[in-house]
Amino acid sequence: MPSETLTIRDNRTGKELELPILKGTEGPSVVDVTKFYKEFGLFTLDPGFYSTASCISEITFIDGEKGILLYRGYPIEQLAEQSNFLEVSYLLLFGKLPNQAEHEQFERLVTQHTMVHEQLKDFYRGFRRDAHPMAIMVGVIGALSAFYHDSLDIFDARSREISAYRLIAKMPTIAAFSYKYAVGQPFVYPDNERGFVENFLYMMFAVPCAKYKVSPVLVKAMDQILTLHADHEQNASTATVRLAGSSLANPFAAISAGIGALWGPAHGGANEAVLNMLGQIRTPDRIGEYIKRAKDPQDPFRLMGFGHRVYKNYDPRAKVLRKAAHDVLQELGHVDDPRFKVALELERIAREDDYFVQKKLYPNVDFYSGLILSAIGFPTNMFTVIFALARSVGWFSQWMEMISDKGQAIGRPRQLYRGAMTRDYVPLYQRD
Ligand code: ACO
């Protein structure tokens, strides 16, 4: 029994139970309630997971009060500035920064897997041209399990690793194909001479009739967007991947479930809403009107890109993207983009306003990311796809951690039943 415990008393029977308190390396401790039902015959209820930890993890830590995000202990700001998405992928998957040889080998292995099976391309033709690219992603990522049986033994560490390389390498190709299909342009095959992020931009925006060259400033910003979105501990889509994977489903199937969860506007879709809002406000002199609306309890309008369930401080990811947005717009000669001007001014006004200060509403990661993606040339319906591309590394790492855990069991929530009591079936001819 751990040294710290919590004593619970059932006032109906007077029975007391000492529950172990488990400490983490950082953040709040947790009360282990696994014996609660056996001892008390009661379940705990917490549908939104407001007070419930769903697992023990060593991957990502968030301190929302202080605005801290760590991947395997490393601050996100340092990783976004000094590392890159591929190195961060290695870090998330394997728990340490790679040395030179590991780095090169990881890069080589990911690069080797960027192509998709030719037959996988046929899937795209089955979709309508106006299909949402997330619908395509759910289908095609799930379909990977029909192509790569040779790495689907989830109890074999080597197979899990190969599946990880395949997923990380093929996500950009599959994402770019979903865009090319929508706009009626030919698929652009990966060019493995290019780095991971540059290759993605190449597959997205190159056409066979013109040379494609991209500015390193855009590549860096894109890399930062992917790095900042790579993991975020137990959010809705990651929890979905873990739950689906806990049934011992293969990782492609579990991650396809995660993509479905990410698709919802309450999770992956907010940066699109920010862009729409900035477009609506149009000029800085109209900001006051929108701030007033956001503060009015009778008006459902909220400042998009402000506030976060976990961060009650400046989202550290937004800080990085604020600078990246400036760099990208300057590089493209768009610093006068009215949406950027409105964004900067909106942030300044909101951060001095008592309502936002009192409620601890700060810009979140979505506030600037849409501006950057739009400037690079992504249509808004691709924003969530980019999020999925980045998060696939976090999903895979979390899945791998779960499946390698000796105590792993199928996730099986319980419920409070409030339906009908037991009743006898009534034949159709006897019903009213
Ligand atoms: N604009 C104006 N008021 C706000 C905003 C906002 N963006 N966000 C919260 N509030 C107010 C609420 O009206 C509420 O006020 P009240 O206490 O007077 O009722 C209070 O702040 C707390 O709001 P909750 O919704 O209870 O806070 P919660 O932590 O559950 O919500 C959420 C977080 C959903 C992100 C919210 O801040 C929001 O709707 N923001 C705008 C949408 C957005 O940017 N979403 C992206 C989140 S980041 C991500 O998912 C990757």
Image (tube, helix red, strand yellow):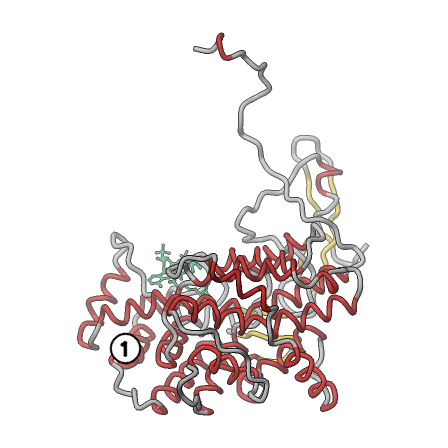
Q: Position of residue 306 (x, y in %)?
A: 38, 68
Q: From the viewer's perspective, tell me whether residue 270 is left or right of residue 79.
A: left
Which residue is labeled 1 in the image?
A: 339
- 407 left or right of 58 in image: right
Q: Quadrant of ligand 1?
A: bottom left
Locate the C terminus by quadrant: top left
Front residue of 262 and 136: 136
Quarter of image, res 227: bottom right
Q: Position of residue 139 (x, y in %)?
A: 53, 57
Residue pictured at 57% horizontal, 62% vertical: 141
Three-letter amino acid code at disc 1? Arg
Q: Nearer the viewer, residue 5 or 222?
A: 222
Decide: is 285 above or below 28: below
Q: Is residue 9 visible?
A: yes
Q: Secondary structure at mark 1?
A: helix
Q: Is residue 306 visible?
A: no
Q: How many numbered marks have been drawn onto this rendered protein structure?
A: 1
Query: 317 or 376, which is in the foreground?
Result: 376
Quarter of the image holding residue 412?
top right
Q: Residue furthest top?
A: 430
**Residue 386: x and y, percent?**
48, 71
- In the displayed structure, would residue 211 be above or below residue 389? below
Image quarter (top left, top right, bottom left or bottom right) of the N terminus: bottom right
Q: Residue at x 61, y 65 (%)?
A: 395
The residue sitting at the left extreme is: 285
Q: Is mark 1 within 8 Å of ligand 1?
A: no
Estimate the x, y position of residue 174 in percent, counting from the top left.
53, 69
Q: Residues within 10 Å of mark 1 (few under 14, many from 20)?
A: many
